Amino acid sequence: MTSTDQQAFLSVRDLKVHFSTEDGIVKAVDGLSFDLEKGKTLGIVGESGSGKSVTNLTILGLHDRHRTAIDGEILLDGKELTTARESELEKLRGNKMAMIFQDALASLSPYHTIGKQIGETYRKHTGASKSEARKRAIEMLRRVGIPQPDMRVDDYPHQFSGGMRQRAMIAMALVCDPELLIADEPTTALDVTVQAQIMDLLKDLQQEFGTAIVFITHDLGVIADIADDVLVMYGGRCVERGTKEEVLRTPQHPYTVGLLSSMPSLDGPVDVPLSPIPGSPPSLLNPPSGCRFHPRCTFAEKVPGGLCSTERPLLKVEAGRGSACHLTLDQRQEFFADLAATRH
Ligand SMILES: Nc1ncnc2c1ncn2[C@@H]1O[C@H](COP(=O)(O)OP(=O)(O)OP(=O)(O)O)[C@@H](O)[C@H]1O
Ligand code: SF4
Ligand SMILES: [Mg+2]
């Protein structure tokens, strides 16, 4: 995140994404702002249904346009995407911005070889010949660590293992050297070893190409490994943001504290008991008033006047660091000190 007035490579400003459904309006994203520079990774973390995927599908222009109301701005390298035509977005997807998802099988066609699929993406954006595209597909497969890429290029997705399919999807996403890569839980379905390999691969590729990465996950361990900056989402809003060190070491929001308490410490003592956050994520059809976290927050009673259930705490951001909570700074220091002690 930038602390200057200079335009960031990706800049999301007060983004709102609301869906009309038979039951009413679902406020999936409700006023989200963040910046991302080239060569940096922003980790977006939050429980299921907090609006992580909707945010990123909206950046890519892959939302359902008929039932979706979008407000705010998404600027990619200075270009406004929320008002861009579908044909312009189509050009940008794959070329300037690309994505990888959790489920490679669903993203790859079962009827075409891996090489053909990577090559076609390349041809579409560069106009390369079929033989150039095949060469490029082999080169990309080699780069993402597929052994014998000149042979495996003619395999179909089902002939690849889960980890290899994920690599192939990364190869396809990166074939046109996109400047922005959105990775939505790309390693969740993989075993820990393959997960670590894929993360290393993404880091290497980022170093090589200077790609900006948005990495979505519900796993703070993954954030600790890959992110530079972190944005914590709750109920369609950002509740905390900062550098990885700031957010993981000195969290300022009770929800982040809850997330950290429900995961094992990365380098701390192993016998600290884990305590999952009680209750369940809010309905976005009819979200709680005031602070959306208040029905689950064990600190709400420390704020006088029942403010937590009546008044929305604003996100105050200074130099990229901020949180949205009515607790005073002194209160947070006092209440969260125990957590910090167990995690240092
Ligand atoms: N097309 C849609 N129409 C109506 N509601 C939707 C639509 N797409 C998503 N939602 C709702 O928006 C909210 C946010 O969904 P989203 O997929 O962004 O969550 P998420 O943070 O990615 O969760 P997960 O960790 O489970 O992937 C959810 O309540 C979801 O049900
Ligand atoms: S504003 Fe109140 S309910 Fe919300 S996180 Fe802070 S203390 Fe908890
Ligand atoms: Mg999701």
Image (spheres, rainbow, N blue to C red):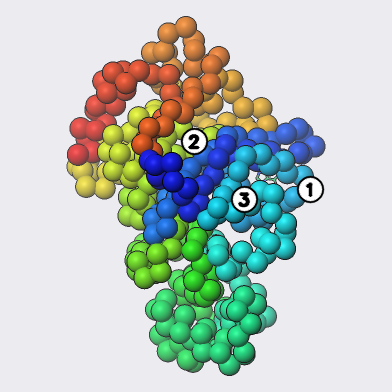
User: How far is the residue under mark 2 from the one under mark 1?
Assistant: 26 Å
Question: Relative to residue 167, is residue 97 depicted above or below?
Answer: above
Residue to which mark 2 is pinned: 238
43 left or right of 102 in image = left
Asked if 62 appears above or below 328 in the picture, the reply is below
Q: Which of marks 2 and 1 is nearer the N terminus?
A: 1
Residue at image mark 1? 66
Query: Residue at coordinates 80% horizontally, 37% vertically from top-left?
Result: 22
The residue lying toward the viewer, choosing from 320 and 107, is 320
Residue 80: image location, x then y, percent: 62, 50
Image coordinates for residue 216, horizontal then vertical, percent: 48, 51
- Which residue is the site of mark 3? 80
Q: Identify the residue at image location x=61%, y=72%.
A: 108
Q: Which residue is drawn at 55% across and 52% down?
A: 78
Question: x%, y% of residue 315?
Answer: 46, 28
Secondary structure of the residue carrying tag 1 is loop
> The C terminus lies in which quarter of the figure?
top left
| Mark 1 crowd level (few <14, some 14–19, many ≥20, 10 Å Cα) | few
Q: Quadrant of the N terminus?
A: top left
C-alpha distance separating marks 3 and 2: 21 Å
Residue at the limit of the structure toward the front, as seen here:
6
288 up-or-down from 115: above or below: above
Q: Assign a secondary structure to mark 2.
A: strand
Q: What number is the disc on residue 254?
A: none
Residue 145 is situated, as x and y percent measured from the top left of the image, at 39, 78
Residue nearest the observer in this picture, 296 or 83: 83
Describe the element under mark 3 as helix, strand or loop: strand
Check disc 2 and give the amino acid type: Cys
What amino acid is labelled 3 in the image? Glu
